[in-house]
């Protein structure tokens, strides 16, 4: 039988309490290390709140919150406790990005989505105030074409009045349900207030590899 929702919240908390180690920036598909762990990627428009969300999830300054939107063009990889690789994908849709840069981005993301079998889930971040924009829909189409399973995650939900939140969430759910590769649920988050962070951790705990059982030699090989 599947564990209860409470149990998954606990598993998510335990997973994200692990050390999160920066592996390296990836500029080209060929640079990607052949890691064995399940991988989850975070994607979204530049300034959507991706770095803030990764920092809130990991409870530390894992990703750099940038003052210059659109600057990071690399995929940044992190190892979370030897159980999950986190891939922070470069943000898209930065208006002032030169054309050649946008093209490079497209190449790298396309190669990554198609050629990374350990990729289990992409969290596609949407700013709750604006809803899905054209380039978010293009990203959804690319994810669908690559058969990459993804979850829509609303960010900055604290910026909406209580009365506006459910319509933003319902719009995102309606959008998700018209795309086969999209998970039918949507998680609304705030890096400011912590809303939705525990739920997202629980969601990602389903994807991570199980914790290693450690054996204690001194206790006759009993499990810790
Ligand atoms: P990125 O470019 O997608 O990595 O976005 P950042 O994490 O750098 O965030 C962009 C801006 O949005 C920063 O000024 C953040 O402080 C702000 N921000 C990010 N997440 C939230 C949130 O949940 N609530 C609020 N109110 N602001 C946020």
Image (cartoon, rainbow, N blue to C red):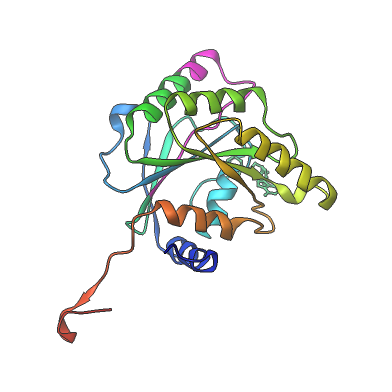
- Residue at figure coordinates x 38%, y 44% from the top left: 39
Residue furthest to the front in view is: 1
Residue 145 in percent (x, y) is at 45, 23
Q: In the rendered image of this protein, does residue 1 appear above or below residue 95? A: below
User: Which portion, as a residue range, is magenta?
Assistant: 85-103
* Nearer to us in this view, 4 or 211: 4
Q: In the rendered image of this protein, does residue 47 appear above or below residue 157? A: above
The image quadrant in which ligand 1 is located: top right
Horizontally, residue 77 falls left or right of residue 217, namely: right
| Quarter of the rendering containing residue 77 | top left
Horizontally, residue 77 falls left or right of residue 129, namely: left
- Residue at figure coordinates x 67%, y 31% from the top left: 132
Query: Is residue 147 found inside the magenta-colored segment of the image?
Result: no
* Nearer to us in this view, 68 or 38: 38
Residue 123 in percent (x, y) is at 52, 41
Residue furthest to the bottom in view is: 219
């Amino acid at each position: 039988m599947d564990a209860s929702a409470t149990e998954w919240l606990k598993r998510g908390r335990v997973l994200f309490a692990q050390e999160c180690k920066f592996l390296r920036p990836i500029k080209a598909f060929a640079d990607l290390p052949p890691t064995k762990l399940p991988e989850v990627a975070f994607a979204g428009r530049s300034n959507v709140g991706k770095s803030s969300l990764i920092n809130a999830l990991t409870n530390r300054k894992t990703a750099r919150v940038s003052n210059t939107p659109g600057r990071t063009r690399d995929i940044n990889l992190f190892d979370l406790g030897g159980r999950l690789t986190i891939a922070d994908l470069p943000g898209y849709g930065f208006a002032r990005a030169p054309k050649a840069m946008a093209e490079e981005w497209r190449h790298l993301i396309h190669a990554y989505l198609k050629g990374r079998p350990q990729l289990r889930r992409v969290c596609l971040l949407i700013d709750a105030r604006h809803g899905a924009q054209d380039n978010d829909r293009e990203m959804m189409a690319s994810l669908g074409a690559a058969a990459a399973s993804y979850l829509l995650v609303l960010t900055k939900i604290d910026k909406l009045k209580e009365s506006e939140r459910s319509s933003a969430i319902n719009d995102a759910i309606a959008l998700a349900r018209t795309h086969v590769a999209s998970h039918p649920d949507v998680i609304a988050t705030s890096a400011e207030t912590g809303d939705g962070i525990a739920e997202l951790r629980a969601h990602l705990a389903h994807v991570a590899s199980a914790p290693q059982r450690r054996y204690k030699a001194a206790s006759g090989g009993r499990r810790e």
